[in-house]
Image (cartoon, rainbow, N blue to C red):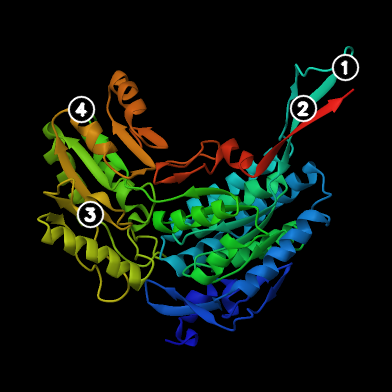
């Protein structure tokens, strides 16, 4: 399908897309890729092409890294006061809010996300996070130390530490929350004084390019934030580039593992926020109605395309039928459709390729003996829509239980004993998030320390806060986004020892 076939009504929502073909944003200007190759951006609800962006190669990455290096070492940015970095970031947060309708519509068009969700998370939470990180620009600090260094009689030493920017940051972000997660990388890096080369997902590059424009409008000097579009070639070139001091990646565990190896090979710093297979544990004293709503939101938000989605539901046998059938009823009542429709509760998954992948997991689970309590099929005749699905009669060894599906697919299992369910919850290569549902505070305090997950919720699931670090144990990653932990990860600690 040609880009000109896209509905003019849809295009009118997004002024940025009045121009259908976009370039990379390097050193403050848009420029074409040296490769000359293009990647189509497709609306998964209609499967129409809405735009195209470069399929960049190593030459494009080299230009972007060079611009970032110059901005880091000898530019207005390198000489800028922390208070001025704070002011620019705060201005960017205001611009994100002012352009919220445009940015959220762009997210819906390229990813299928409900526009209300995009408005709340990708715009609203992101603006709050940028403001939060703006404040850190003036609050990074070192410490004075009391040394015991031996020396000649009368010698004295003054020692202290200081935080310095880690350098040029390569940020590689996924398609599920492209604007929000880009800012999870960009805002703390800029607060620390770093410069950034961002590579968005080829499925969802549009908000990254628009963000670069807004950052320039906020006063960010040329070369401080660069955006290079493309697929695996561009990503690999960025992660292996000798001019990149740190890689920050959010995405799949296999890709993250490769990126970690590439970073270690040249001793670059890296943080990885990877896959998840998060358990939700409902104890016998839990409020079943709250558990039903928590499980429904935990797995079906953004069509299950959330790394912390509560995809494994463990319910005490005394509540199992009530909770699981309650979730199934909620799923059956969900309205499936375009994310632009305010009445829609479940949109499409991001692409035809991902649609086939998720359906493959559902079909495979049936072949292994699982029962579809509800859903399990295509939701509409056109577009990448999957019915919200609840699978029962599953066993711990099934692929759908052990691997990250990243779709609207819930596996539900009963348990009888708390020790048993803790073992099952931890029996996973992942450790991103988990939740415990109970009205007994003592039970919560006993179970929380035993769950191997970076975030454990009690009577909630998947919530975020700007001040709360987010990241995983085991194969769910290394390092943390959000909170002070994030901005610290974009700095190096320098020790200074001075003979006085």
| Residue under numbered circle 1 | 155
Dot 3: few (<14), some (14–19), or many (≥20) neighbours within 10 Å? many
Please tell me whether mark 1 sits on a helix, a strand or a loop: loop
Please tell me whether mark 2 sits on a helix, a strand or a loop: strand
Task: Give the CA separation, mark 1 to mark 2.
Answer: 17 Å
Q: Which residue is farthest top?
A: 153
Please tell me whether mark 3 sits on a helix, a strand or a loop: helix
Q: Describe residue 311's horizontal placement relative to residue 390 as left or right.
A: right
**Residues at circles 1 and 4 in contact by the CB criterion of under 8 Å:** no
Tell me where residue 302 appears, x and y as whole percent.
Answer: 37, 56
- Closest to the observer, 294 or 98: 294
* Image mark for residue 400: 3
**Residues at circles 4 and 2 in contact by the CB criterion of under 8 Å:** no
Tell me where residue 84 appears, x and y as whole percent.
Answer: 79, 46
Compared to residue 18, the image places residue 147 above or below, namely above
Q: Nearer the viewer, mark 4 or mark 2?
A: 2
Q: Earlier in the sequence, mark 4 or mark 3?
A: 3
Q: Describe residue 133's horizontal placement relative to residue 370 as left or right.
A: right
């Amino acid at each position: 399908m040609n880009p000109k076939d896209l509905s003019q009504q849809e295009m009118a929502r997004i002024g940025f897309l009045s121009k259908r073909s976009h370039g990379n944003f390097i050193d403050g200007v848009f420029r074409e890729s040296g490769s000359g190759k293009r990647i189509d951006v497709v609306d998964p609800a209609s499967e129409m092409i809405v735009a195209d962006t470069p399929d960049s190669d190593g030459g494009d990455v080299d230009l972007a890294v060079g611009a970032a290096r110059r901005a880091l070492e000898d530019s207005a940015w390198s000489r800028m006061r922390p208070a001025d970095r704070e002011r620019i970031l705060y201005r960017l947060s205001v611009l994100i809010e002012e352009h919220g309708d445009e940015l959220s519509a762009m997210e819906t068009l390229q990813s299928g996300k409900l526009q209300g969700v995009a408005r709340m998370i990708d715009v609203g939470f992101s603006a709050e996070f940028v403001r939060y990180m703006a404040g850190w620009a003036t609050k990074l600090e070192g410490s004075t130390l009391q040394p015991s260094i031996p020396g000649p009689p009368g010698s004295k030493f003054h020692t202290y530490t200081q935080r310095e920017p880690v350098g040029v940051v390569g940020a590689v972000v996924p398609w599920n929350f492209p604007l929000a997660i880009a800012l999870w990388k960009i805002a703390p890096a800029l607060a620390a004084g770093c410069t950034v080369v961002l590579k968005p997902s080829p499925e969802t590059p549009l908000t990254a390019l628009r963000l670069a424009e807004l950052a320039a409008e906020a006063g960010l000097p040329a070369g401080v934030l660069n955006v290079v579009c493309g697929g695996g070639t561009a990503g690999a070139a960025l992660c292996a580039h000798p001019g990149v001091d740190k890689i920050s990646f959010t995405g799949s565990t296999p890709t993250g593992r490769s990126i970690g190896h590439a970073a270690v090979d040249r001793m670059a710093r890296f943080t990885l926020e990877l896959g998840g297979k998060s358990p939700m544990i409902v104890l016998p004293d839990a409020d079943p109605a709250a558990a039903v709503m928590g499980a429904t939101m935990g797995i079906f938000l953004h069509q299950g395309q959330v790394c912390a989605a509560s995809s494994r539901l463990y319910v005490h046998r005394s509540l199992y039928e009530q909770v699981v059938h309650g979730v199934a009823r909620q799923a059956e009542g969900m309205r499936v459709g375009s994310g632009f429709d305010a009445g829609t509760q479940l949109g499409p998954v991001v692409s035809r390729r991902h649609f086939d992948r998720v359906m493959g997991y559902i079909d495979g689970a049936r072949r292994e003996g699982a029962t579809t309590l509800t859903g399990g099929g295509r939701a509409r005749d056109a577009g990448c829509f999957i019915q919200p699905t609840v699978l029962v009669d599953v066993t711990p060894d099934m692929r759908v239980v052990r691997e990250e599906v990243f779709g609207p697919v819930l596996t539900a299992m009963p348990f009888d004993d708390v020790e048993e369910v803790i073992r099952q919850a931890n029996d996973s290569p992942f450790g991103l998030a988990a939740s415990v549902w109970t009205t007994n505070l003592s039970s919560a305090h006993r179970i929380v320390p035993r769950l191997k997950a970076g975030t454990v919720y009690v009577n909630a699931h998947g919530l975020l806060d700007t001040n709360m670090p987010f990241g995983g144990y085991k194969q769910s990653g290394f390092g943390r986004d959000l909170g002070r932990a994030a901005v610290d990860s974009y700095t190096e600690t320098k020790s200074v020892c001075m003979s006085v």
